[in-house]
Amino acid sequence: DKPGTAHLRILLQDGLECAADCDSTVSHERYYSFHYILDEAVEDQVTLVPLTASTNFPNPFWLTGWSGVINNAQFDLGHIKGFSLELSVGGEIAFGETVSGSFSLDPFRAVEVVEVLPPLEEAKCIKEEGLYLFEWATHFYRRIEFQVNGCCDLCHEDSDCLFALTNGRDCLLAGNNDFNTSYVGIYSTQREIDTYQTFWTNSAEKRGD
């Protein structure tokens, strides 16, 4: 009933290096997380708190040293002994005053959040290192002059193109119907390696896979 005067704290109890009386919360490292959400009236709101912590503020969880013990000062997620909740009222409330309200923690739970990344754009062409398609086989290729940089795109957009060759100046496209292994070789000189690039289309539909 008095906005801005109370907040929720979640405490995680790390019991990795507890030496004695380990069923007591005072024997654990106690990590605090602070949530100023009690004044929000949004229904079906989801608040995600990453399970990471340190001795520094701010962090999702903070080893304050206010309670419990300091052992190795490392957040050992695999040794969480338990958790507790606190409602904290700030200094704005005078002595003798009260704060009232209600909230629900019914869906309070630990969850695994999986980040779903968008699929990477599939490559239009695959460069075949060291493979040379003989450009003198003119009946095998369709030559497009002065299109070195866009050769892969041209092959991708051409419904018949399966193979492409750039010779430093032109783009040469070839389909499967005219393919002959006698037109295929291996680069034998550094000049060929520096000059020619061979591609094949990365389309299963065009290849007939």
Image (cartoon, rainbow, N blue to C red):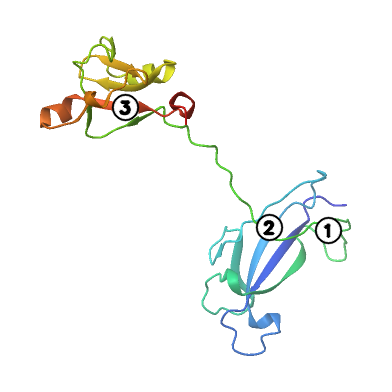
- Give the residue pinned by disc 2: 111
Q: Amino acid at mark 2?
A: Val
Q: Is residue 49 left or right of residue 3?
A: left
Task: List x then y, in percent, for residue 30.
Answer: 64, 73
In front of the other: 201 or 18 = 201
**Distance of mark 1 from mark 3, alpha carbons?**
58 Å
Residue 92 against residue 12 in the figure, above or below: above
Label 1 neighbour load within 10 Å: few <14, some 14-19, many 20+:
few
In front of the other: 180 or 189 = 180
Q: Is residue 175 left or right of residue 188?
A: right
> At 52% across and 37% down in the image, what residue appears?
119
> At 81% across and 50% down in the image, what residue appears?
3
Q: Is residue 7 left or right of residue 115?
A: right
**Distance of mark 1 from mark 2, alpha carbons?**
14 Å
Task: Return the disc, 3 or 2, that comes first in the chain's sequence.
Answer: 2
Task: List x then y, in percent, for residue 28.
Answer: 63, 79
SS under mark 2: loop
Number of the front mark, 3 or 2? 3
The dot on residue 199 is 3
Q: How many numbered circles does the render carry?
A: 3
Number of the front mark, 1 or 2? 2
Q: Amino acid at mark 1?
A: Asp
In front of the other: 1 or 55 = 55
Residue 139 against residue 80 in the figure, above or below: above
Q: Is residue 208 left or right of residue 87?
A: left
> At 11% across and 27% down in the image, what residue appears?
191
The dot on residue 106 is 1
Q: Quadrant of residue 12?
A: bottom right
In front of the other: 101 or 108 = 108
